[in-house]
Amino acid sequence: MLGLGGLVAISLLVLGILFFGGDIKAALIPVEATLTSTPTQLTDATFISMVSPEITSIATPPIDSEGIRLADGMQMVYVPEGAFTMGSDEGEENEKPAHQVYLDAYWIDQTEVSNAMYGLCVSKGVCQWSSSYKSYTQRYWDSPILLSDRPVIYVDWNSAKTYCEWAGVRLPNEAEWEKAARGTDGRLYPWGNQSPDRSRCNFNNQAGGATPVGRYSPAGDSPYGCADMAGNVWEWTGSLPRPYPYDPLDGREDPAARGNRVLRGGGWSNVANLVRAAYRFRYDPNLWSAYYGFRCACSA
């Protein structure tokens, strides 16, 4: 049962609400003074926590004003809103037809996520190195830490998704990835329509493995300044490999849906045709490979 003090407090609360109308914060001030021995200043944060205790803080943006991601130090680049040409009428069947897709503005990683960055997530107990990665690195380079500037590999789609979410962002959808890679003029490769060569990207087994992220900048960069979007390692996207025209509302962007997921960009062992910006590849989201990595994105 309520004591006299409790009844008085409730009475004051009712009178305060009647007196102040809808201003509940004002009504709570005399109640707080009554229930405690010392007056308490009722700030907006205090009021929010009293009304909705599960809200403890206001979410902060994942990047700073310069586009640097706070969780891992990744530089993200801005892609403005607008339409671009997705797909290719001269490419593989799953690239047809070429069509216009409009995207809102977004941010995408300048490079592939590196071993050093992924290691931060591992150190927090959120991510983990795969058993295959440990075997691979111990055999060839002893430790992923010795390859800190290389793109992380041996990550399946679920691990890539986990990392991006840990960093406060997400995997790019297939359309976001392609626009960031080729811009709005329908070019074949990030740098234009010229065939790849050793100055622009890591492809055709020229390096015998993945090279440090950003090594081919700026010659191989996309119109928005993204590096390694042709070659080096294949990159997971959030999308299911459904037919074109691209429709983000047809279920292909459902993260809970079953099925293969799309990889983009080609890898260090692939020929020129496979490192085109429009080329699409699919793979089981539960499997990993020495050829697969990822980058992240977020809406602007």
Image: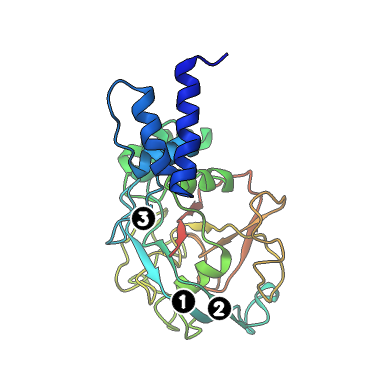
Distance from the alpha carbon under mark 2 to that under mark 1: 7 Å
Q: Is mark 2 in CB contact (under 8 Å) with mark 1?
A: yes
Local packing at callout 2 (Cα closer than 10 Å; few below 14, some 14-19, many 20+) is some
Q: Amino acid at mark 1?
A: Glu
Tell me where residue 104 appears, x and y as whole percent: 50, 72
Which label lies toward us, 3 or 1? 1
Which color scheme is applied? rainbow
Q: Quadrant of the C terminus?
A: bottom left
**Residue lying at 71% horizontally and 61% vertically, measured from the top left:** 251
Between residue 244 and residue 50, name the one nearer to us: 50
Residue 211 circle label: 3
Tell me where residue 237 appears, x and y as whole percent: 56, 58
Local packing at callout 3 (Cα closer than 10 Å; few below 14, some 14-19, many 20+) is many
Which label lies toward us, 2 or 3? 2
Q: In this figure, which residue is indicated by the disc labeled 1?
A: 81
What kind of element bears circle 1? loop
Quarter of the image holding residue 224? Answer: bottom left
Residue 102 circle label: 2
Which numbered disc, 3 or 1, marks the residue that appears first in the sequence?
1
Tell me where residue 141 appears, x and y as whole percent: 36, 38
Q: Is mark 3 in CB contact (under 8 Å) with mark 1?
A: no
Q: Amino acid at mark 3?
A: Thr
Is residue 11 shown to the viewer in this render? Answer: yes
**Residue lying at 64% horizontally and 67% vertically, measured from the top left:** 248
Which numbered disc, 2 or 1, marks the residue that appears first in the sequence?
1
Distance from the alpha carbon under mark 3 to that under mark 1: 32 Å
Which numbered disc, 2 or 3, marks the residue that appears first in the sequence?
2
Q: Amino acid at mark 2?
A: Tyr
